[in-house]
Amino acid sequence: MGVCPFHPNPHKSKAGLITTFFLKRRSWLDGLYERSYKMKVGQVKMPGFDLLVVNDPKEVKKIMVDNVKEFPKSELLHELLKPLLGVSIFTTNGDVWKAQRELLRPSFELTRISKVFDLMSEAASDMMDRFRKIPSGEIVEVDEHMTFVTADVIFRTIMSQKLDEKKGKEILNAFTTFQEETVKTAIRKFFCVPEWLSKILGENKRIEAGKVIKSTLAEIIKPRYDAYENDTHQDILSSLLHTTHADTNERFSFDEILDQVSMLFLAGHETTASSLTWTLYCLSLDKNAQQKAHDEIISICKDGRFSIANIKDMKYLTNVFKEALRLYPPVGFFARQAKKEMKIRDKTLQKGQGVVVAPWLIHRHDEYWDAPHEFRPERHEKPILKEKYLPFGLGERICIGQGFAMQEAIIILANILREFSLDLQENFTPDVVGRLTVRSANGMMIKMTKRAGI
């Protein structure tokens, strides 16, 4: 038996259009109903958008692996994210995506280099210094700490800069605004709200938030872009500056690099921060799992800095993280679009119609998982069908930074669990919301107690 972390109770039946409009403006999770968790394929109809939600693993494989070219990324998703991500690998399709992926690939080979590992470890070490200054037994809002440390990791590994507190707050506040307003903008588009009214209701906030983030990144990138021939850094930005296209021998333009770095910042810090916060939450509820993870860490490395070999040896802690990813996948849905008419089970998918593959629903489907809402790290001791467990996506578009994120997460968790025991604040319940990522809208309040003898 595992513990059962909180998840939003779905509505008994499907809400009407007006109710859906107000529910989903805050979080798409608020619009789910009981059948959402049991169906294989469902249809969602709104005035300006009609989509299929696909939970059947066989159909998921068709969409994301076998017939991936027939299901490109959603044009609406690209439109929504463009103020921040521009024309980046996250939303592009076809030959543009292939070329971008190939140009980015060498950068992520850096994740196997000790230099990047060391930069991650330094960010984790600074995080621990911040935690040690907090009195033992204090209630800590860990979500903001996880958001800051993962953003710091990205700044160090991509641009060889520490993230200072003031700049960090500006960027992270802007990103929170961007997330909130993107969901609202999407719902307004689904319900055909006129563009002039959408601007009055907050559309400009989303665009301005994207500008704040990109201008901060541009300040760091531009001097190095202009002097790239003399750039001696060993970071991901340096790799991007020197990478050239195999066919044209051309390098990324400044705007292209800015778009890709913005994408790496979004995907690299936000998703990992979400996953780390939910992992700490699950461990604060499951004392046995927490103790088992702690014992493993101590047996591998009782003190001093963790090595790459240490991190790879932490099998149980890795399974803990994987199980938190199952319960709270950072990206709760993947949006695609049909290039032609086709059948999905008993439904006819029209050309141009939206398709959603939702890890949030697939990971909690009771036909695919025993006690799906329970936290059970042991599930991951045996191989799991890829179409049933896809926190990083699936197929050729699987997250390019998966190895980077796993390495970073285990470093951060190992540092925290070695020194602190975790207890959820009494009577605290996270407010689970689905926006661009799955987060807790009211943070995560955990009592952190210094372990004896450490």
Image: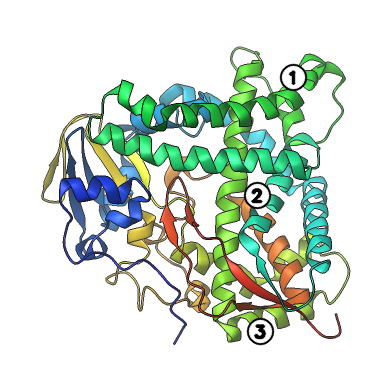
Q: CA distance from mark 3 to mark 1?
A: 47 Å
> Is the C terminus in the top left, top right, bottom left or bottom right quadrant?
bottom right
Which-is-in-front pick, marks 2 and 3?
A: 3
Kind of residue indicated by mark 2: Phe
Kind of residue indicated by mark 3: Gln
> Is the N terminus in the top left, top right, bottom left or bottom right quadrant?
bottom left
Quadrant of residue 277 within the rendered picture: bottom right
At which x and y percent is residue 218? 69, 24
Which-is-in-front pick, marks 2 and 1?
A: 1
Up the image or down, 452 lies above or below 438; here it is below
Up the image or down, 409 lies above or below 448; here it is above
Up the image or down, 418 lies above or below 163; here it is below
What residue sits right under mark 2 in the picture? 404
Q: Looking at the image, which residue is at 55% across and 56% down?
A: 274
**On the picture, is 345 further left or further right than 440?**
left
Q: CA distance from mark 2 to mark 1?
A: 25 Å
Q: Looking at the image, which residue is at 42% across and 60% down?
A: 389
Labelled pair 2, 1 in contact (Cβ < 8 Å): no
Q: Looking at the image, which residue is at 60% across and 32% down?
A: 262
What is the number of the mark on residue 430?
A: none
Q: Nearer the viewer, residue 231 or 315?
A: 231
Q: Looking at the image, which residue is at 60% across and 61% down?
A: 276
Q: Nearer the viewer, residue 143 or 332?
A: 143
Q: CA distance from mark 2 to mark 3?
A: 26 Å
What is the number of the mark on residue 291?
A: 3
Specify few, some or many for label 1: CA neighbours under 10 Å numbering under 14, 14-19, or 20 or more: some
**On the picture, is 269 further left or further right than 433?**
right
Count of numbered labels shown in the rendering: 3
At which x and y percent is residue 168? 71, 42
What residue sits right under mark 1 in the picture? 222
Identify the secondary structure beneath mark 3: helix
